[in-house]
Amino acid sequence: MKNVCLYFNLHQPNRLKPYTFFEIGTDHFYEDDKLNKDFLDKISTDCYLPMNALMMENIQKLGPDFKFCLSISGTLIEQMENHRPDVLQSFIELSKTGQVEFIGQTYYHSLAYLHSVDEFERQVKKHTAKIEEHFGQTPKVFRNTGMIYCNDLAGRLEEWGFKGVMAEGLNNHLNGRSYNHLYAAPNVKKIKTILKNYKLSADFTHRFMDKNWNEYPLTADKYAKWIANDTGDCVNIFMPYETFGQHLSPESGAFDFIKHLPNELKKNDITFLTASEQVDKLGVSGIYDIHLPTSWRDSEKDLSAWSGNNMQKEALQKLYSLENTVIHSQDPDLIHVWSKLQTADHFYYLNTKIAEDGATRDYLSPYESPYSGYIYYMNALADLEITCKEKM
Amino acid sequence: MKKLKVLKLGWEFPPLISGGLAIACYGIAKALAKKTDLTVILPKASQNSILDNANIIGLNNIDVEISKYQQHTESEVYKKYNAFAKTLFAPGMEDVAPYPSLKEIKVEGSTTTENHFQTTSYANNFTHTETKSIFYGRFHLDEMYGDDVQQKVVEYAEYVAALAANLEFDVIHVHDWMTMLAGIKLKHQSGKPLVIHAHALCYDRAGPDARGWNYDLEKYGLENADAIIPVSKYTGSVVEKHYGINPQKIFPVHNGVEPVETFSENSSFPENLVLFLGRITGQKGPEFFLEVASKVIAENDNVRFVMAGSGDKLKRIIETGAYRKVGNKFHFTGFLNREKVNKLLAMADVYCMPSVSEPFGLSAAEAAQFGIPCVISKQSGAAEVLNHALKADFWDVNLMAKHITDLLEDEDLRKRVIDGTFEDIKTVTWENTVNGIMEAYSHVLGYDVTGGVKNEIKDIPKPQNISYSVKKKVVPTIEIQKDDLKKIEGIGAKIESLLNENNIYSYADLSNAKLSKLKSILENAGSRFRMHNPKTWADQSEMAAKGEWDALKKWQDELDGGV
């Protein structure tokens, strides 16, 4: 293996407060500002700032050879603008090195693609504008929320000028082929599909702390060798930035791992590629044919994490039923409030899965249960509906 | 005349309240204390459990000495009692589920050998273990019910019997299954008549098919009672028909209702509000409420439903509400404190109690005091008292939905129901309850202790700012030209509001509307509108818009229903 692409996504939702029945009609602010700010402060201290410092150190140490990709949601950028401009600045500093590529996504980290193509397009453009504003780059490669992907998505992104799109590399769709190649959807001319190497990505994100794993402990040296020995054109290691410091505690050695990984990769003569470079340099090895949307979430790798049960379906249906009224109101505040309610996390909190996937939800959710999350969300939506009715 | 000496055994009593039982026991005791020499024995009483003219004994406050099972084998009754006393688990124990369950009971000096839990069948596989309790000291009750509630019930009986050996009384009056065992023991020890007050039965909590020790204990108690006072005729019929009790000894007496301080508050949203208040368990019929709500919401955009309370069915109802796609109009509050409950009562436009089996239904009477029209199930005691409330069988969701819609749309009906139920509750007093109780006492004692009292009517102050009209429909805030569309032949008030909802307000709007659009508006509004034919409406309104009223009138006379 000659190439590797490191990609990190970053996102924070605007979590809702326990919005009770008695608030409907009186309180039009649904978010828990304090909680969201506390979350941002904590994740900044635990992850964003130390990681940015580490990556900057790697850039300085390894020079122009070291590159990676970031995708930051619009909601997180807004939170940083409002509460932590210092953290935003540290991302800007990284972007100034020219060795970080910013990847497009929906501004509100939403499921809009699945529910309203118009809204999806608005959010993709809004996100592009935000990235241009702060980082002076125009995203050319796109990743959808939860790595949700299908042929139709690739087709639309191509129309809007993207040259690459990310997806989960799923064996049942690869039919024996490797995810370490670029592929194309059957319905596109140019846009290339970049597949996540879920095996190697999960070796780090899911098994790094697993003492029962026969490869434990995982070192940067060992990991670099695995990448070097894997076959194909390019290994795509995708993971949330928050893996460092949040999912994997500082005591786990995760920071140490990422500190040494670039150098170990370099030692193995591996070239760092950004997503765009990969698309520019490498050819397509075949068709990756996905009719129904896939994702990188939960064991099912489908949409069930966000819309698997009736509560999720109802919340989504009622939210998007307001689209026409909200958009036609041309009221920027109303549009913004409605849009923030689209953030996928709101629906993820409502999933009623058990076992490992349920435990992950409980770990991420600010609510005592999916049911109370649903109650608060629907109360807030009822209030928004009243506002919309008044606008009509 | 010498006052009748009554020994009352209670379980819940203010300030220990888990439901309506404590409120009822307090109301009865307070009124009974005025006419009798009353002693109340409770498992737990606090400094606040004080009542004028009554002697309240909390077993947590006094030491009682009990020798261990000394006479248990002497009679048939004790044999049965003894068997129950040794039963730690019996099939059907989960029937006590409505009560908050938890854990430890600490009886000082008591140890229990291992429990053998069996959950599989309803066969007679009772598990026996010896309780090696040394019943000396104070009765401790951390949790009123809990997993080991049977043991508490047995121990309570032992304590009460020992304590009451030195008390003088003419009649024993107990409340519900927790105190029945103690009542039976006392009856056999003292030879005094036993009166059982039935507030709620296993039948209500767990359904007609529920069996297990809870049902067995109730049946045993009811059979041994000299008189039974169910809180309604409805519960009386359950006692008779589901427990096989001789109706001659059943004396239904309704509970009283304390006048509550009421107020009215506008809700902060424009829609009307329909309220469900109670534990979200099968007994209260929450599924039926949801089904009724779905039906009303489908026809009426201007209404919200709220389900206040918590219970084992909450999650299921939440998911079903989502499935029925009423999540934005059907809300949940979880458990609420009294202050919030009152706030909801002050906001509500209709109260709905679709209980599957409701011995009384205090909350409906409270709602009536708040000036809220009630829709209640026929399977409730409240239905016997609130003559003017609208009623339906709990399963008849169509009729219940119709009642709610009618109350929201028909102001005359609304006023009749509000005023009527308000009159109804004036006779629902604890004094009248006690009069009924005295009749039951007379029956068991063989002589008249009623003193020939007649039922009284109490004047409950009516809420000052009672509102007979439901909230106004949401109208657009923008100033619009509005004509009386009802002047068009074929259009009534309902269709006019339908057209308004679709932005047709004036004759000009209507004359410009396409026939296909009008048809689809009617089509979408439901089956009862489909038969209307809007063919001539545009032409009619064109004439109206031009002010050609005479010509229009002439034409309309020729038309029939707008066609």
Image (tube, coloured by chain):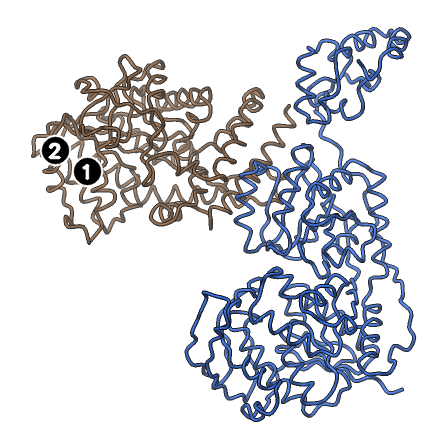
Chain colours: A brown, B blue
Q: Which residue is mark 2?
A: A230
Looking at the image, residue B239 lies above or below residue B446: above
Secondary structure found at label 2: loop
Looking at the image, residue B313 lies above or below residue A151: below
For residue B204, which quarter of the picture? bottom right
Q: Residue at horizontal 74%, vertical 61%?
A: B234
Looking at the image, residue B370 lies above or below residue B322: below
Q: Residue at horizontal 68%, vertical 40%?
A: B268
Quarter of the image for the N terminus of chain A: give it: top left
For this view, does A364 lie left or right of residue B444? left
Q: Amino acid at mark 1?
A: Leu
Q: CA distance from mark 2 to mark 1?
A: 10 Å
CB within 8 Å, label 2 to label 1: yes
Q: Amino acid at mark 2?
A: Asp
Question: In the rendered structure, which disc, 2 or 1, sits on the residue that comes first in sequence?
Answer: 1
For residue B4, which quarter of the picture? bottom right
For this view, does A40 lie left or right of residue B292? left
Q: Residues within 10 Å of mark 1 (few under 14, many from 20)?
A: some
Tell if the residue under mark 2 belongs to the same chain as the one under mark 1.
yes
Looking at the image, residue B526 lies above or below residue B232: above
Q: Give how far across and how far down residue B516 sits, in percent.
A: 66, 13
Q: Give how far across and how far down residue B558 sits, in percent.
A: 88, 10
Q: Give how far across and how far down residue A387 sits, in percent.
A: 62, 30
For this view, does A215 lie left or right of residue B232? left
Secondary structure found at label 1: helix
Q: Which residue is mark 1?
A: A200
> Mark 2 belongs to which subunit?
A
Q: Residues within 10 Å of mark 2 (few under 14, many from 20)?
A: some
